[in-house]
Image: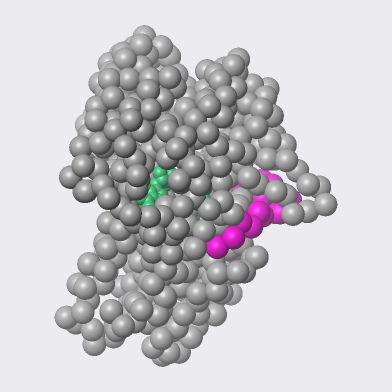
Amino acid sequence: MGKTFDIGLERLTGGSEFPIGSSITTNKGHANRLAARAEASELDTMRGASQGTFFLETFGCQMNDHDSEKVAGVLLSRGYQQVESPDSASLILYNTCSIREKAAQKVFSRLGEFGLRQNDGRIIGVLGCVAQQEGEEIFRRAPWVSLVCGSASYSKLPELLAQVEAGNQRVTGLDNDTDETFETTVTRRDNPWRAYLTIIEGCDKACSYCVVPYTRGPERSRASDSILREVRQLAELGYSEVQLLGQTVNSYKDPTARKMRFSELLLAVADEPGIRRVRFTTSHPRDFSRDIVDVIDAQPKLCNHVHLPVQSGSTKVLQAMQRTYTREEYLEKIAMIREAKRTISITTDIIVGFPGETDEDLAETLSLLDAVKYDALFSFKYSPRPHTPSLKMNDVISEEEKSRRLAVLQEKQREIQTARHSAMVGETFELLVSGKSRRENQWSGHTSCHRVINFASQEQALLGKYVQVRVTGATPNGLTGEQAL
Ligand code: 5AD
Ligand code: SF4
């Protein structure tokens, strides 16, 4: 479900950003040229620092994607070259996700592949949430790993890499209480038009199922002047869309004397010349205030999409999850968003099979779907995680039953999405074109409300441009269209 939405969270479930899959390619060459401009002077001073090559694979959410862009920037500035396959790399890094057990297991299966040839001289490192969660245990399970570094310690990555390069076999960066955010002078961005920007790290909420407060540490907001400086640089490099990131992005608290509210920051980002679209994810319902809706209404550059995870439609389950709001309070936030002058798309995350969830609780979640009519839904089976309060609750619901509940939920959303998509046929949207199919005259892009549309156009050079597209076809998972001239 939710494939039409270009939200990136699909990465958590192994989906693809482009619904027509491998036939779409992005213009990475252009991205690299843009990044190269920013990096040129730094690289000059570092030239010769390393003859190494690195392979970096990323699992998980957009925060991880963006962390990897920064890690790649740091490595490039040390003279490394990026390669597409681990076979030709002298440094292999996995930036890992531990939000659910399946994601965490993936990295151990990757690491296992190197066990048989552990003396071939390569350096292997584990970064991100599994690194933070498992710590030095990773060295025991995979002794061929030499670097284990959690995201809260990335500001130390250059030092840690220097130790690894000097031949140290067991290098760790596992502090979790740093108030430094990971600001690098060089970030190698993957997408040439849309730039991610982390504005708040970590999380101070304490949802009982969630490992993030443990793996990413306490909430730390980045200074507003530093954010705005980076947005200005991005605009100068040709980026027209910026996406502000944070686990609870709308809990942003400006640490400077300016004390900008989140909504004021949104307006200030949109005011930077060259910026055409500003989006933000993920919002926490508790901190979602009316002023955010007001600024979306006032400034069309602020995208009309809010990702507002509900997790469950049952107040009883929400309480057990420690989500800090009731079903009714959540629905009040939805009503506030629906009162906006512009139609704002709303997407959500839901967990089924949380300990103690009954059929009645599931029925409440289904009725919430009817009440809200989400534009897309990201749904997950509850997965017990280390260091989380819900581990102590009895996970009485079997995997089979969780799968059944997930299927029921997804079927419900399928019906809602089918109706929503059919109603869009004939409407025209502005798209930022970011993909070109190998099939002739076929392109793909995303709307301000974050939907992906595949469309036909006879024009030749559309990548990075904004075009009007009329929707001509709809399925539950996708929209197709043609350029409106
Ligand atoms: N089990 C299942 N899903 C989870 N999520 C977070 N932790 C868990 C867990 N332990 C889901 C939530 C969150 C999304 C990113 O991942 O729905 O919003
Ligand atoms: Fe996890 Fe809850 Fe924080 Fe989101 S708000 S990162 S679900 S603890």
Residue 25 horizontal side relative to residue 221, left or right: left
Does the stretch in magenta take in 225?
A: yes
In which quadrant of the rendered image does the N terminus lie?
top left
For this rendering, which residue is in front, 261 or 4? 261
Left or right? Give the position of 274 relative to 67: right
Question: How far from the left and from the top, in percent, is residue 82?
Answer: 37, 65
Q: Is residue 88 left or right of residue 152?
A: left
Return the residue nearer the eye: 369 or 272.
369
User: From the viewer's perspective, is residue 388 above or below residue 410?
Assistant: below
Span shown in magenta: 216-234
Quadrant housing residue 411: top left
Figure check: 67 above or below 366: below
Q: Residue lying farthest top?
A: 426
Q: Please give the name of the residue rendered at 40% of the width and 80% of the height, measured from the top-left corner.
A: 136
Quarter occupied by residue 23:
top left
Q: Position of residue 435 (x, y in %)?
A: 35, 36
Report the label total: 0
Considering every residue shown, the one lying at the far bottom of the view is 167
| Residue 108 can be seen, yes or no | yes
Is any atom of residue 468 visible in this view?
no
Residue displayed at 36% across by 79% down: 137
Q: Is residue 293 left or right of residue 484?
A: right
Considering every residue shown, the one lying at the far right of the view is 257
Is residue 119 shown above or below 37?
below
Q: Quadrant of residue 221?
A: bottom right
Quarter of the picture containing the C terminus is: top left
* Residue at (55% x, 69% y) in the render: 176
